[in-house]
Amino acid sequence: MQPEVVANTLREVEKKWSQEAAVFVNCNATHGANCGGTPKDFTKSCSTVVGAVVQGSGGDKRVAKEYMGSVCSQHIAGWHQQHCMNLAAALEKTMTADSYQNRNSFTANKLCSNFWGEFVAEEKNRFIKEEAEREAARKKAAEEAAKKAKEEAERKAAAEAAAKKAKEEAEKKAAEEAAKKKIEEAKRVKAEAQAKAAEAAAKLAKKKAEAEEFAKKAQQKMEEAAEAEREHKKAQETLKKHEDKKKEVAAAAPVVPAPVAAKAEPKKAEVKAAAKAPVEAKAAPQPPKPEAKPAAPKAAASAKATDAKKATPEAKKK
């Protein structure tokens, strides 16, 4: 028998034994009582393996021990190797020093029955240990997951806080920029309003000055017109007095009747006297005139011209 082949076979057999042990342990744990003796499949496979080893060693206890040592060291590890070594120890304990007796009267059922109890106890401890390891692994995984979740939550919270802070800073900056723009806009509007107000005030002052100048000139024109009116009235009065004077002079002059012959051809002396009459009437004394503006002399000259025009026809009639 090749140890490596037996090792592979024993490893596969131990997997089935482990499954049977798990069922047995769970049954006892659930019902709280013994769920039966050694399983038949275990007994059969165990007896086959043990019998093969005893017969292969020729019943020699020392050879069987060395052989089992070689089998248990052939690519077997973990709980498979532990069960292999336990089986080797049980086989060594059961075999006698008499090789002949071992070859002919060795009973494998007794060994397998005792080994089953050890195997179950070992499997139970392994189940408990593995369950504890699994529980520890689950707990560790849960702790790591919780730690990772906490770190992720903290990272997310930090990111949210940073984002919130950045948003607040951006909003604050935007608000400051908006306020700054409003202030600048208000200053600009105020400056424009002040400039427009100053321009309007300047225009108003100019218009007011122009209006005052116009009113002053209008007042001056009115005063000049009033003065001209007064001068005109004075000239009219003077002209009337002059006309009245001429009438008085004409009324006071003696009328000399001329002969009929004289009417046809007046004498040169009479013609000269008639020509001198208007001159004398012009030279009649007049009242002194008050000082007047440039418009007054024009009125006086007009009055004299009118007098001359009126006086000439009268002289002609005479």
Image (spheres, rainbow, N blue to C red):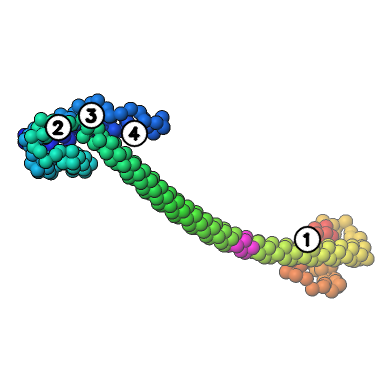
Magenta stretch, main secondary structure, is: helix
The amino acid pointed to by label 4 is Val
The amino acid pointed to by label 1 is Thr
Tag 2's secondary structure? Answer: loop
The image quarter containing residue 88 is: top left
Report x, y in % for residue 239: 84, 64
Residue at the disc numbered 2: 106
Tell me the CA gap for discs 1 and 2. 191 Å
Q: In this picture, which residue range is highlighted in magenta?
A: 194-202
Q: Is residue 70 left or right of residue 265?
A: left
Tag 3's secondary structure? Answer: helix
Report x, y in % for residue 34: 36, 30
Residue at the disc numbered 1: 306
Residue at the disc numbered 4: 25
Marks 4, 2: nearer the viewer: 2
Q: Are marks 1 and 2 in contact (CB under 8 Å)?
A: no
Q: Which mark is residue 42?
A: 3
Q: Which of 260 and 32 is in front in this view?
A: 32
The amino acid pointed to by label 2 is Phe
